[in-house]
């Protein structure tokens, strides 16, 4: 069973030390809760730690909350083995665009990009990404994203034991 770590929590567990770390980069504000849908699809995967930046209760009145959130995301993006980027409808996803440029197109991390068919800048994301990473996988549904995560883990480690 995957271990899910929600922002801004930390979990240290020796049995998870060598598991693949997956960061869910994608829209939160004005976007559907795609993270919960994806977690439901992949939570049965073995050897996986999922970093989920969407919190159930964000303390909007805490002036330090945004900085803590951003720092948590930075640390976990840096430490992840795989980053998935989901461009949700409902927002232009400016932070996700930044994260894709910073972590996806300028590092050697394994990435998968999902783009909701109703996302306004789909073509821009695809063209820019393919210029720097021509082997990038693009998907358009949460189910397809889960399948790609499974395939990437199987091809990368041959250690996954979970069933889809």
Image (tube, rainbow, N blue to C red):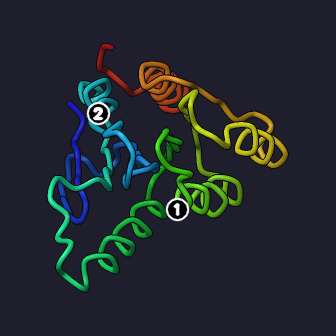
Mark 2 Cα-neighbour bin, 10 Å: few <14, some 14–19, many ≥20: some
Residue under the point 51% across and 24% down: 148
Q: Secondary structure at mark 2?
A: helix
Q: Which residue is mark 2?
A: 39
Please provide percent x and percent y for residue 131: 84, 45
Q: Earlier in the sequence, mark 1 or mark 2?
A: 2
User: Which quadrant: the N terminus?
Assistant: top left
Please provide percent x and percent y for residue 96: 54, 55
Residue under the point 29% across and 77% down: 68
Mark 1 Cα-neighbour bin, 10 Å: few <14, some 14–19, many ≥20: few
Residue under the point 53% across and 29% down: 152
Q: How many marks?
A: 2
Q: Which residue is mark 1?
A: 95
User: Which quadrant: the C terminus?
Assistant: top left
Please provide percent x and percent y for residue 102: 63, 64
Question: Residue most toward the right?
Answer: 131
Question: Residue most toward the top?
Answer: 163
């Amino acid at each position: 069973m995957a271990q899910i770590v929600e922002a801004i929590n930390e979990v240290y567990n020796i049995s998870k030390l060598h598991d693949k770390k997956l960061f869910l980069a994608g829209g939160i504000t004005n976007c559907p809760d795609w993270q919960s849908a994806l977690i439901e699809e992949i939570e049965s995967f073995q050897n996986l730690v999922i970093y989920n930046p969407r919190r159930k209760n964000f303390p909007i009145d805490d002036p330090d909350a945004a900085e803590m959130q951003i720092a948590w995301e930075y640390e976990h993006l840096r430490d992840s083995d795989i980053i998935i980027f989901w461009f949700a409808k409902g927002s232009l996803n400016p932070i996700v665009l930044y994260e894709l440029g910073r972590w996806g197109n300028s590092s050697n991390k394994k990435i998968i990009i999902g783009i909701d068919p109703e996302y306004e800048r789909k073509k821009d994301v695809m063209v820019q990404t393919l210029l720097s990473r021509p082997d990038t996988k693009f998907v358009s549904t949460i189910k397809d994203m889960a399948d790609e995560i499974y395939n990437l883990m199987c091809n990368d480690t041959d250690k996954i034991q979970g069933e889809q």
